[in-house]
Image: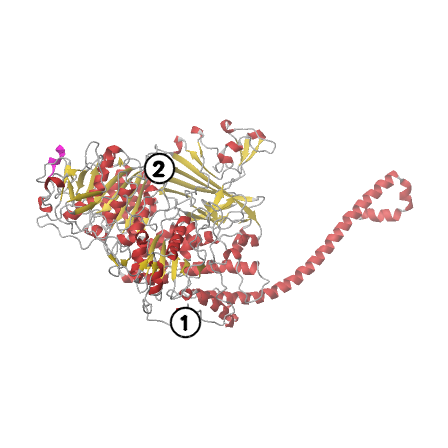
Amino acid sequence: MQPACFDPVLVANSSPLASASPAISTAKTEPSPAGPDASRTSSLSNSRPDLISNNAMSKIKFFKEGGATPPEGSPTSRLSGSPVSAYPAFKPGAVQASGPAPPPAANSLNGSSPFSMSPPQSGASFAMYGGETPGAKTPGGYTPVAFTPTGYTPGAYTPGGQLKRANSGVGFTVDASPMKNGVPRSISGTPRKFGAPAASPNSRRRTETKKSNSRIDPEQVPRPVGQPEAVKQEGGKVYETTKYHVPPAATTVCTVVDCGSSSCEFIRSTVNQVPAYPSTANTAHIPMAVVCQPFAELTPFEADIPCVDLGESGPFRCNRCKAYVNAFFTWHNGGKEATCNFCGQRVEVPLEYMCNLDEKGQRVDKAGRPELNRGTVDYVAPSDYSESAPVVPATIFVIEATQRSLQCGLLPQVMWTLRSLLGFMQRPSSRIGILLFDQALHFFAFHPGLDCARQITVSDTEDPFAPCGAEVLLVDAEDPAYRSQIDSLLDELPGLLVAEGLAEQAAGCAALKAATELLGSRGGGHVIMFHASLPNSGIGALRHRDDIKLASEPEGGGLFAVQQPTFFEEIDVDCLNRGVAVSVFCTPATGIYIDMATLCRIPRRTGGEVCYYPGFDPSRDGERLHYDLSRTVVQPAVFNVMFKLRVSKGLAVDSIHCTWDPEVIDPSTFSVSRMSVDATADFVLVHGERIEGQKHAYVQVACLYTDKRGKRLIRVHTLQLPVTSSLSNVFRYTEIDAVTNLLLKQAADSALTGNGNFKDKLTKSCVDMLHAYRANCASMTAAGQLILPESLKLLPLYIGTIRKFPAFRAGSDIKVDDRIVSLIRTLGLPIALTASLVYPRVYTMLPLPDKAGLPTGIGDNVFLPPTIAGSSDKLATDRIYLIDNGMSLRLYVRPEVGQETLYQVFGAETLQDVSVILSAPEDFADSLSEDAERMLSCVQQIRRERWRLPWQSFHVVLPGTPEESRVLASLAEDRAGSESTYASWHARSELGEESDPSKRLEAGGRPKAEIDPCFDAQISSIFSQMKVWNLARREFRRRMAIQWSKKYERSTELEFRDASEVVNRHVVWVALFIMVLRPEIACSCPSHTARRFRV
């Protein structure tokens, strides 16, 4: 299918308002030579043909009526098809970047708007969209422009030249020799290699790891590698929340059944057995924290969250701590009283909520009340919970319309995606608006009965405003009265921009202010901003301040600070008060500064999304932007959120780590305009006192929010955790994903605030936990033996990898914008992405194992190949690998993969042809072998397992390209800058034995805590210290054992004497009683009786 071409068409309307402003300049249009045949009505309600012919020029429309599916006959790649039916599928090649920006028209006015003639110097010009076309007397129609657009040209670039394949279609030359039914006939000559000269067979073997003197085998150190477990039933293994000691890993495909304690999909704890005493927690050094993702999506196999409506009385709560009733309340006095499981307060049950108890002390109506048998429940909020009535949130798309935006393809790609989304937005949350900006602001008003939208241009960017009310600027996209106008606008707007010449200035901050005020006037909503260049015009204009010297400093040299702080603080406060959220999509040119530190300020505070595509190219990044935008619009996000975390007696909330800011006084509370399904917050807990007399500790999350239907609800999650006094149990039931997620966010918080020693804190946290386990739970092991707790065996690997993150490295090779975006994404990282982001998985795609890519027999699932260590030493030079870092999937073709192999697997003659073929495999079905089909099945299997996470784009990485260096740099076990490899890390831990232990002791005999510049040196000294400690500890324990043995013998002797005395006293009293009854016995033994009586 040919790429979509945005035709330069103008829309005319005979409304009387058209005369209020000059029409579009005749210098920017020419009469069409097609005559009357070139005109047609612009109304799309009667007819929307997929292909419209205008003489010899084909004009391809994007979608049929409804916009939900691509046109018939147009292939949609399996690699681009969304596994979620709620999102529209991406169509490769629909949008491509254009060449240089078109020069302005010969007699156009300086600084003219791309939509109309130059507006007045201030205020707003009210003109119909496009105005009246000179020379055209077809009211309600349009006149196509005769010339070909120069700013946005159709056609695709094929890397590596012309592609040849059998049975080719249009656009490819036919070569009859290579293939027959997908099988190569014959290839003469020796297969040639790519990226390297012909090598011997020995050179194709992977590079072996150099041997060291270490007694630790580098092949045996812990790694998250091996054969992924295939699901054995639809939905995966079933887990009940009250029966597992440790929840399943966040990456596990499973079904969680809520049996009273909240599902691990919503809330997880770092320690699944809470220490009863503060001393135990301090000894373990494991941070106590909960990771909350309150609005995570559930699988189709999990029960929906019940919604309880208790009327204006609202949910039953504790009078003292305000905790909501849950499955762990206890009931007394025939159901008239209840005891709170959080504070222990006994409260009176309201009359309307009272119920009798059964013989077990449970309420008779427990089975019929979801809040008493489910850990997660929604309540309908009473009216007194909110100051104002809730409204259905609306969405306004604020898009940059400058030369840069059109050159890179941002504007056409956004228009294409919005057009495809029209059939997927569900009412009543389908109310949208469109605002474009360059050096002015361009609103579009929609009125029933008109054929096209009405354009309103606001040129005053120093004091921007919305020229109309929200009822005409924000309309229901699913309403038939407006649908044809929106269709027409989205289809034809890019062509108009191509036809007219664009400005270079971008009044992005002025557009942000106008959009937030517009949504705030109606009660809240979502502003989605699209930037292709630095906002350099109007109020809040930003200056270019990128400096290599400043960027190389650990804290960014002040580049992390926000420009125009007063302006953005005012917008921030206004958005939070009115319930307006802001998301930002930025597509700067490669290496160009766009000041993400400032542009991300409002999205961070309001709970919006931050999407960043440096060097944006629709052919490479269009798919990712399409699904990111689709997910942002369609997902069941919530608005006007008030969040509170409660913990049971003995615990307290110490701090919070998330993208937004907590309350100044109470770190357990925050308010945010929007929370997405991925929004995550980590709360660090501390002991306020001992947890005595309690078998369980409890955590409860309460969120007051407005859903996309405009209903005000309260979501409550209640988590039950066992309490233990055993240090071994604390380590045994620790969850590595939650601990890593917390440490990662603590490091990101420190980096954003300019604290440069966050790497040392990471290392110290790891050292403290491992040493605590070795010293207290594995002290009887031999000196020099590597001992790691089973639950935390991957922690050293994860910490070493986090230190290598580009976000945590200061240097001129890391752009400050890249660092800012990476740190902000880290703060909002869902726990399901933690493991794959910290340690990217590497799958061997060629040769494939026997079962890889073949169906498992359970649904559409296929077997995945085993993963290997993430090190370049493990990558053979003649193989193909799939690297999964949680955000993208990259098929890495190694340099010595032969031509014959490429031809047999993909039907490709060059390396570049592999990218072309895999971008649209349906077009090359005859060329793909069974191995290639299995590879594609593995890619889709990974996406299928992570359908609730952001879309993972797929790219082919070729040797000798810049992308190859980025892929190799992402391997977790290799050296990065001053950080060493994972293997040498363990080797140095053994070599540390040779160091003089006396130099490591402080006054008092305690080893010093050394902080070396390299992580491996620190760890080597750590283990050396642990060995020294172990020798001293053994002698100390031997002496203490002797002392305790003597004390035990003495105490045993004393206890025996005490017991004997008690028995003797009982004998005396019995004897006295007998003597009273039988006086003759007392006369027979007076001396014996008198002696016993005195004792």
Residue 307: mark: none
At label 1, the amino acid type is Asn
| Left or right relative to 677: residue 504 | left
In the picture shown, does residue 680 fall above or below 971?
Answer: above
What x and y, as percent, mark residue 634?
34, 41
In magenta stretch: residue 16: yes
Q: Which residue is mark 1?
A: 202
Q: Nearer the viewer, mark 2 or mark 1?
A: 1
Foreground of the two, 831 or 881 = 881
Whether residue 149 is visible here, answered yes or no, is yes
Looking at the rendered structure, the secondary structure element under dot 2 is: loop
At label 2, the amino acid type is Lys
Q: Where are the magenta residues, as a range?
A: 14-22
Foreground of the two, 407 or 339 = 407
Q: Which residue is mark 2?
A: 708
What x and y, as percent, mark residue 308?
45, 33
